[in-house]
Amino acid sequence: MAGRASRLLLLAGAAALASGSQGDREPVYRECVLQCEERNCSGGALKHFRSRQPIYMSLAGWTCRDDCKYECMWVTVGLYLQEGHQVPQFHGKWPFSRFLFFQEPASAVASFLNGLASLVMLCRYRTSVPASSPMYHTCVAFAWVSLNAWFWSTVFHTKDTDLTEKMDYFCASTVILHSIYLCCVRTVGLQHPAVANVFRALLLLLLTAHVSYLSLIHFDYGYNLAANVAIGLVNVVWWLAWCLWNRRRLPHVRKCVAVVLLLQGLSLLELLDFPPLFWVLDAHAIWHISTIPVHVLFFSFLEDDSLYLLKESEAKLKLD
């Protein structure tokens, strides 16, 4: 929910540096990459590289040029440490020790575990909540949107490309917008379905315009940051306002409040930007790991709330 918003707010600025960081601007790094490509990435040398490259690396999209960048990154890091300097970033990222085909192993695994937690809670929700509950289909749709976002987050942290980066950003934005829609249905749409339908159409239009601009015109990190700041704030404020308004009548909304506050608090981990511990575990990976139980708590809230709405609707039917 709000966690994807927090992630976008804190990372979009850093992503803007991806076109050039201290490490990849170093002449030693650039010269190393150039020589490596000339030596290994053409003619017979390229055929030899491809023949000895593990199949899982080629299937994951790792090229000879990628390998050169990876090896030269560590050459440059070694020189920095030898001279007593701080570890530099490369293309907007800290240097990570690659494991198999995983570019950022800890973040990739954590993203996968977040998705797995969402899947487990979706199965539990569908088992516990009858389809006749007023919020059932909206909650299930939100779960699938979340699963899709965590899938692309896993792919992006496995191999960072233009496509995987865009899919990670776009799917994260979709989760935030769907969370706003979920809140709209819960607070307004159950009493006024037409309002929810119009609002859904507006959100789809906004998402289409957002994705089209970033894909077809210019992938502007500053605009993407501003857009997600706006929708993230709407998401957080709307949910919190509704929860506080209903805190006495609906005790289970405390779970929702806890989710929103925890995600906002945990997102501050991203501000503790430091070189990866053991070249694997950085602040972003720790943040991903910490959000796993929060997703369980949010789906638990959705389950409680859906069962409450079902009981309420059945009581009204009996009165009628």
Image: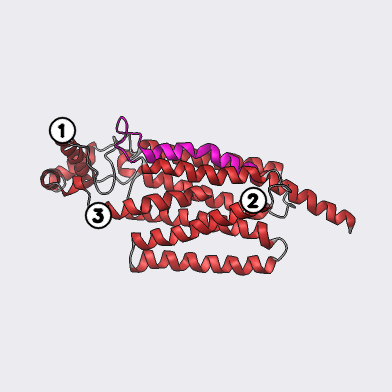
**On the picture, is 291 further left or further right than 120?**
left
Q: CA distance from mark 2 to mark 3?
A: 42 Å
For disc 2, the neighbor class at 10 Å (few under 14, some 14 to 19, many from 20) is: many
Residue 84 is marked as 1
**On the picture, is 76 further left or further right than 8?**
left
Question: Which marked residue is nearer to the observer: mark 2 or mark 3?
Answer: 2
Q: Position of residue 207 (x, y in %)?
A: 48, 64
Instruction: Give amino acid for label 1.
Output: Gly
For disc 3, the neighbor class at 10 Å (few under 14, some 14 to 19, many from 20) is: few
Badge 1 or badge 3: first in the primary sequence: 3
Q: In the picture, residue 85 is in which quadrant?
A: top left
Res. 122 visible in picture: no
Instruction: Give amino acid for label 2.
Output: Cys
Q: Position of residue 215 (x, y in %)?
A: 37, 64
Q: Which residue is mark 3?
A: 19
Residue 289 is covered by the magenta coloring = yes
Residue 190 is covered by the magenta coloring = no
Instruction: Give amino acid for label 3.
Output: Ser
Q: Which region shows up in magenta?
A: 273-301
Q: Which residue: 24% across, 45% down?
A: 90
Q: Position of residue 173 (x, y in %)?
A: 47, 57
Q: CA distance from mark 1 to mark 3?
A: 26 Å
Badge 2 or badge 3: first in the primary sequence: 3
Q: Which residue is mark 2?
A: 243
What colour scheme governs how the chains and residues are painted in the rendered image of this protein?
secondary structure
